């Protein structure tokens, strides 16, 4: 009999967690030939999420919970769940019901019938999402794939079912700067896709502001692309060429006419432009040096405060 581990990262989800468990239980009830374990990962919630998770665990023998000592982020929560999962198939999904539990049986049916290692979901629309966020999301996926040489599908969600061997491959990548969509694409394996319309949160508010999404995008770029390291060389070549061209034009104009070009003005523009380039180069170096600094400390991805796993 197959066993499916369902990993659910939670951060301040007290308003929706009971409803989520109810809906997930309905989906699980349709799969009587499969065993389940539910691994809820409380990512340092400041509300009563942990209290509710403990109540769920008391009445549902398949439910487990892991509670972090503070908020380490969704990537750390997913990683913790993957490490503790012992099912031969693993599902990762959110607790806000934007990842419909009713899709889980369909995922299992596809993964068994096709023999693939992953069944993933993608949104075909971004309804109810701010237009600006949708625009930048589309552009991000296009740019990310070009720079990183990967094939991250536009609209891809973290909601997916994976085989144990794919999970083991993901766990073999211990880096701290984690970008799951890139990691899943990088390890490969055959993937089948399920498309569905965007679903609003059942309760509560999204934890992903535009600023957090922007930082997450930068994390993805610096984790999977070395191209920014070549920007200083390209900038230097471009600057040298433009400077030589400007000097040539200035010489021609000066010889062909009586127009006097102020040397002071040219020097000011050149100095300001070079300062801008230098700061850009320092910013690129700083981003990569920061990642080396974080990785060299080799701190744990998370710290567990409380759990009922193994009890």
Image: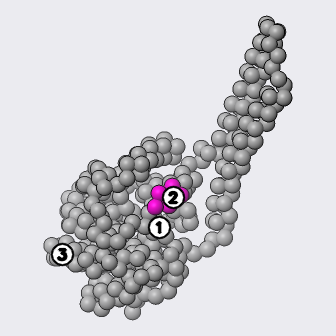
Q: Which residue is drawn at 31% across and 89% down?
A: 55
Q: What element carries label 2?
A: helix
Segment colored magenta: 209-215
Residue 98 seen: yes
Q: Give the answer, above or below, for where 132 lies relative to 253.
A: below
Mark 2 or 1, closer to the camera: 2
Mark 3 surroundings: few (<14), some (14-19) or many (≥20) residues within 10 A: few
Examine the rendering and report whether any part of residue 33 can be seen.
no
- SS type, badge 3: helix
Residue 234 point in image, percent of width and height: 67, 35
Instruction: Compute the Cα span from label 2 to label 3.
Output: 36 Å
**Labels 2 and 1: the sequence-earlier one:** 1
* Image point (39%, 66%), residue name: 206
Is 149 a magenta residue? no
Q: Which residue lies furthest to the right in this view?
A: 263
282 or 8, which lies in front? 282
> Which disc number belongs to residue 75?
1
Q: Mark 3 points at which residue?
A: 26
Nearest to N terminus: mark 1 or mark 3: 3
Residue closer to the observer: 195 or 36: 195
Q: Does residue 210 show up magenta in the picture?
A: yes
Q: Earlier in the sequence, mark 2 or mark 3?
A: 3
User: Could you say where residue 289 lies in the image, as x and y percent from the top left?
Assistant: 68, 57
Furthest residue to the top? 256
Quickly name the residue at label 2.
211
Of marks 2 and 3, the one in the foreground? 2
């Amino acid at each position: 009999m197959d066993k499916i581990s369902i990993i659910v990262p939670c951060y301040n989800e007290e308003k929706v967690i009971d409803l989520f468990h109810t809906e997930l239980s309905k989906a699980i009830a349709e799969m009587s030939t499969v065993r389940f374990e539910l691994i809820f990962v409380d990512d340092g919630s400041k509300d009563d999420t942990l209290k509710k998770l403990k109540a769920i665990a008391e009445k549902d023998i398949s439910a487990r919970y892991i509670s972090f000592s503070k908020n380490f982020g969704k990537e750390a929560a997913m990683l913790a769940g993957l490490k503790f999962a012992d099912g031969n198939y693993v599902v990762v999904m959110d607790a806000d019901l934007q990842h419909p539990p009713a899709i889980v049986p369909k995922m299992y049916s596809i993964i068994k019938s096709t023999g693939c290692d992953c069944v993933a979901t993608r949104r075909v629309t971004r309804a109810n999402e701010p237009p600006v966020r949708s625009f930048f999301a589309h552009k991000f996926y296009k740019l990310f794939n070009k720079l990183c040489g990967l094939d991250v599908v536009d609209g891809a969600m973290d909601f997916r079912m994976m085989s144990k061997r794919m999970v083991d491959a993901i766990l073999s990548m211990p880096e701290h700067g984690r970008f799951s969509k890139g990691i899943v694409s990088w390890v490969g394996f055959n993937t089948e896709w399920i498309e569905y319309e965007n679903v609003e949160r059942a309760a509560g508010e999204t934890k992903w502001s535009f600023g957090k999404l922007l930082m997450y995008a930068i994390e993805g770029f610096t984790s999977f692309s070395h191209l920014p390291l070549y920007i200083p060389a390209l900038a230097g070549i471009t600057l040298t060429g433009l400077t030589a061209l400007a000097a040539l034009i200035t010489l021609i104009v000066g010889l062909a006419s009586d127009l006097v070009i102020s040397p002071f003005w040219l020097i000011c523009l050149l100095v300001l432009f070079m300062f801008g380039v230098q700061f850009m180069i320092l910013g690129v170096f700083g981003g990569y040096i920061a990642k080396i600094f974080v990785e060299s400390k080799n701190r744990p991805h998370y710290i567990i405060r409380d759990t009922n796993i193994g009890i």
